């Protein structure tokens, strides 16, 4: 493991601003995403809002050669779904929208699940359980806790409901670059792993599958899908470790 970068109060203030700007992008999209639009429409709306309304930089565009500002992962797509003008959202779909932006030299990263029209009870249960699992992990964050505590809490929440955790992809440290140390696994043993310290910043972003945990990457080199074609869900927030616990830097209005 490389060095974990501890953020100073003035750096956290900038990250807090970046996080709240990102939350405003989701607030805007909440009123836009609907059946009949394409996933490329979502990308274009977000790009215009980030650049022209907020005056910030979409950090995912150009990252590792990725050409768009966000990922749209629909139904059995686990993560890294590519926006497409031909992928039209229909009632019953669930879609994860994963967005980053950079402001003042610091990056914020968050994702949210959207239900398109009326979704099935099984899909809603998966989406809700994944959200609860993310928060179970977040609530363990405090100085002296371990990353194993975070992963264990997430895993327990999901597996108790009969779901599986994707292990190939994880959360990550974040700051001036998108991906810093440490890797934040969404499974683990309590008491093991890196001990958390005030000033650490990282994402928690569990991917939870309705069926088996096995995934595969499509030939496009980006899109990751469940091997059994069953549904997958993901939620993500950027977190800071505070003196007494945690702060969700990308917290959205409906979560306050």
Image (cartoon, rainbow, N blue to C red):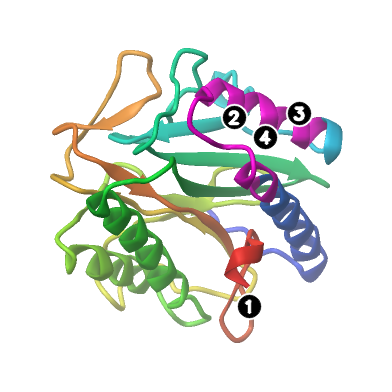
| Picture quadrant where residue 54 is located | top right
Is 251 placed above or below 49 here?
A: below
What residue would you read off at disc 3? 48
In the rendered structure, find residue 42 and report the number of the disc placed on it.
2
Magenta segment includes 43: yes
Who's the residue at 14% across and 46% down the image?
211
What residue would you read off at disc 1? 242
Q: Mark 4 vs mark 2: which is more N-terminal?
A: 2
**Helix, strand or loop for disc 2:** helix
Q: Magenta stretch: give its range.
A: 26-51
| Picture quadrant where residue 3 is located | bottom right
What residue would you read off at disc 4? 59
Locate the C terminus by quadrant: bottom right
Residue 11, image x, y percentages? 78, 61
| Mark 2 vs mark 1: in front | 2
Marks 3 and 2: CB-CB under 8 Å? no
- Say which of 82 and 42 sits in front: 42
Q: In the picture provided, is 4 more to the left or to the right than 19?
A: left
Overall secondary structure of the magenta section: helix
**Helix, strand or loop for disc 1:** loop
Q: In the picture provided, is 137 more to the left or to the right than 178?
A: left
Give the crowd class for mark 4: few <14, some 14-19, many >=20 residues within 10 Å. Answer: many
Residue 190, image x, y percentages? 28, 76
Is 94 placed above or below 15 here?
A: above
Give the crowd class for mark 1: few <14, some 14-19, many >=20 residues within 10 Å. Answer: some
Give the crowd class for mark 3: few <14, some 14-19, many >=20 residues within 10 Å. Answer: some
Residue 28, image x, y percentages? 70, 45
Q: CA distance from mark 4 to mark 1?
A: 25 Å
């Amino acid at each position: 493991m490389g060095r974990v970068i501890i953020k100073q109060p003035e750096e956290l203030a900038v990250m807090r601003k970046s996080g709240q700007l990102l939350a405003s992008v989701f607030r805007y999209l909440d009123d836009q995403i609907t059946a009949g639009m394409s996933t490329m429409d979502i990308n274009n709306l977000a790009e215009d809002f980030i650049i022209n309304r907020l005056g910030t930089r979409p950090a995912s565009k150009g990252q590792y050669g990725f050409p768009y500002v966000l990922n749209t992962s629909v139904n059995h797509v686990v993560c890294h779904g590519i926006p497409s003008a031909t992928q039209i959202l229909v009632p019953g779909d669930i879609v994860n929208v994963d967005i980053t932006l950079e402001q003042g030299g610091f990056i914020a990263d968050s994702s949210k699940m959207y239900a398109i029209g009326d979704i099935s009870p099984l899909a809603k249960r998966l989406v809700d359980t994944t959200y609860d699992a993310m928060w179970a992990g977040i609530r363990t964050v405090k100085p002296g806790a371990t990353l194993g505590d975070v992963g264990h809490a997430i895993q327990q929440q999901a597996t108790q409901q009969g779901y599986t955790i994707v292990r190939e992809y994880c959360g990550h440290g974040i700051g001036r670059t998108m991906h810093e140390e440490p890797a934040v696994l969404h499974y683990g043993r309590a008491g093991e792993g890196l001990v958390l310290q005030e000033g650490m910043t990282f994402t928690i972003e569990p991917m939870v599958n309705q069926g088996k945990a096995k995934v595969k990457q499509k030939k496009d080199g980006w899109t990751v899908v469940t091997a059994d074609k069953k549904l997958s869900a993901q939620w993500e927030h950027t977190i800071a470790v505070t003196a007494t616990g945690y702060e969700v830097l990308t917290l959205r209005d409906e979560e306050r």
